[in-house]
Amino acid sequence: MFLKSYLTNFFLFSLAFLFGCVNNENSASKANNNDIETQEMVELLKKINSEGNPQMYFHWNKKLAEYHKKKLRESTKKEKIKNWLSYCYQLLLAGENQLCIDEIEKKIKKDKLSYDTLLLVALPVMEILGLAYLRLGEQVNCTNNHNEFSCILPLVEKGQHESKVGSKKAIEIFSKIYQRYPSEKYKWLLNLAHMTLGDYPENVPKDYLIDYYKNIKDKSITPFREIASKLGIGVNGLSGSVSLEDFNNDGRIDIFTTSYGMEDQCKLFFNTGYGFEDVTRKAGLNGIVSGLNCLHADYNNDGYVDILILRGAWLGTSGNHPNSLLRNNGDGTFSDVSKSSGILSFYPTQTASWADVNNDGYLDLFIGNESKPNQYNPCELFINQGNGKFLEQSKKYNLDQINGFVKGVAFGDINNDQWPDLFVSVLGGKNFLFKNEFGTFNDISKNAGIEAPYYSFPCWIWDVNNDGYNDIFVASYDSRNLINLATDFLREMEGKNVDSEKSKLFINNGDETFTESSVDFNIHISMYAMGSNFGDIDNDGWLDFYIGNGSPELTSTIPNRMFRNLNGNKFEEVTLAGRFGHIQKGHGVGFADLDNDGDQDIYAVMGGAYEGDTYPNVCFENPSSKNNWVVLKLIGESSNRSAIGSFLKIELDNGRKIYRTINTGGSFGSSSLQSEIGLGNCKSIKKISINWPSGKIQVFTDLEPNKKYEIFESKNNPYQSQFNKLLFAKNFNHSHHQPQKQKPNRQMDNERMKTPQKIN
């Protein structure tokens, strides 16, 4: 018996080894498995997952379903209906749609009920059943048989459902609900279901027809194409985030993603030039799980970009999870150094921002934590000591006064004094603006006029009108009304009044005050924004933005939205015309030139907060425009290596001026640190000025459009980088500017890898 058991175990182990299931598959993974601190974090995350209480974790729906199933068996006759309904609801949230349907339909048959009778006595049951059928159709057609057209409005034929049972049954049920309880929420779901069947709008009854596609107005924008599945980067998961950056210094933008679940593995993809390779295990990241947001920067000035993962958001007292600082070792691997670096803490959060707050040449880290009336979780300011370690000094810098449910933070210079100021977005409270007064912070929120909206979420600092002064955008997320998110969306679309709070755009007056201008810029709307970021989708030199919408509610199925900047005067929605209208919940968003063709592509993390509300991430490939561009990669030496906080002024031959600040964009999603700047229809660049955080000013007059340059803070001559278009987009038949092929610049390569003066 012992021999048989031994041989069986040996056989199973051999199979595991052959199929790559053993961690020591190569020397790189062996080395990283011996990384003690990383393994300690892996074990800590496992412990948190194993000891978690399902009743406290709203997204542990399979465990919650089992809990209610057990209670159902033990409940009295009076309690049975309540426990049964909770059981069915958790099955729905867990993605066990067929099981949920079977359970309810069995109950209907057993009690000899009809849908009409059920509607009268148990509306919640009818709604759960309708949603289960709708989600089943989506699960079978869009998740299990995913393609590039799935779930993107307008739904073309290839994006429509082949298996139509789920949507047909959903229409039958929601039609009955709508007839008795007419509301925009059910009206919208009915129209969506018809879209999936391909009979919209022709076969939609007039009493609930919505002419949504009338909003396809702008024909000038060429539709983007969703290519994540083609490239193998369509990670299927819950809400999470993305960092887009060249992590291995090969000149190509890589992808790092996270997902909310405590068992959800983070993913790292290296850009090969032909596609992407999943190098998660090789990078020593196996077991680094969870994280609602992430962002990147070179915190130790070693020339390799590091990653920060943020955890525990929305979970209150159950969200005391550790964040992870992943140090890039420069050999393709990462190590978790949260503890040894001094940033390890246990507060629920999803937002942070990097900046050199004291201008000493090293990046500091501000983390905005979530406080509630019964749970104070102080925000943290970690000051970089220049030796790979940080000290928490929020009190010293006057940033210990924030007590609120912080959902977004952003550093940016609002008064052009070359000191990074700080904006803090609070959900259910007043927002903050802290002026950096030469290394300490002063609250100027009230006088600045930026305290609204009361219910806010993602935010960023940017120069929306190219006047040389940074403005502030903060998106609304009215948590009082999340269950009616779809209702608000539909009412706004139809021009009706909506009581929910609107997003705010604060235009800088140049005197440390701002004018709220969302009405003038045509974005005075309720966005219910989660993930979001900004970039320039058409290389016209004006910054656009993408909003990932949603709430945990399964009825909140509304499209994510894209807004194009029209010459710094107003925004135009191009959601449908550009094919950005993905109806899955959107979270972390990053803009970057993934295929080296001179325009910005968009990677967005999809999926909700409930266990069954998963969906593959998307990547929108930019079809390009006729406009010119320039890419500038700044390398700090006296300033921080990432050059975060550097201020760029680009003067063109047609008299235009374009202003940019180096950062990773918004507060939910992390764009590349290389500055990808659209130049419009200019023929030449007259001058580029760079104000470094150190105070140094550089001026260049010899740079050409449609090229990439690396600029060192100490060098007077920029290096033209080899910037060849990558091959993974070659089959998409788009017309791009073709960068000139260049011979490798050995001098540039040598300089790139030189250790800056201030590295320790």
Image (spheres, grey):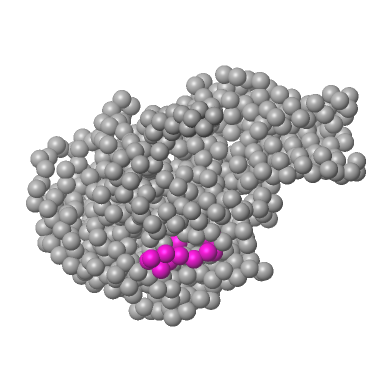
User: Where residue 474 sits: x, y (%)?
Assistant: 51, 58
Residue 146 visible here: yes
User: Quick check: 44 left or right of 334?
Assistant: right
Residue drawn at 66 percent across, 24 percent down: 166
- Seen as rendered, the residue at the extreme right is 77
Report x, y in % for residue 511: 40, 74
Find out whether residue 342 is within the magenta segment: yes
**Position of residue 687 in the picture relative to residue 439 (left or right):** left
Residue 95, how many percent across, how many down? 63, 35
Instruction: Determine the residue positioned at 87% across, 36% down.
Output: 121
Residue at 54% x, 71% y: name it: 378
Residue 599 appears in the figure: no
Magenta-span inclusion, residue 243: no
Camera-nearest residue between 40 and 481: 40
The residue located at (45%, 47%) in the rendering is 287
| Region of the chain picked out in magenta, as a range | 339-353
Q: Is residue 44 above or below residue 272?
A: below
Residue 520 horizontal/vertical position (percent): 50, 55
Q: Please indicate whether residue 250 sits to the left or right of residue 221 in the image.
A: left
- Quarter occupied by the C terminus: bottom left
- Image quarter in which the N terminus is found: top right
Instruction: Name the one closer to the observer, 640 or 27.
Output: 27
Q: Is residue 251 above or below residue 757?
A: above
Q: Quadrant of residue 21?
A: top left
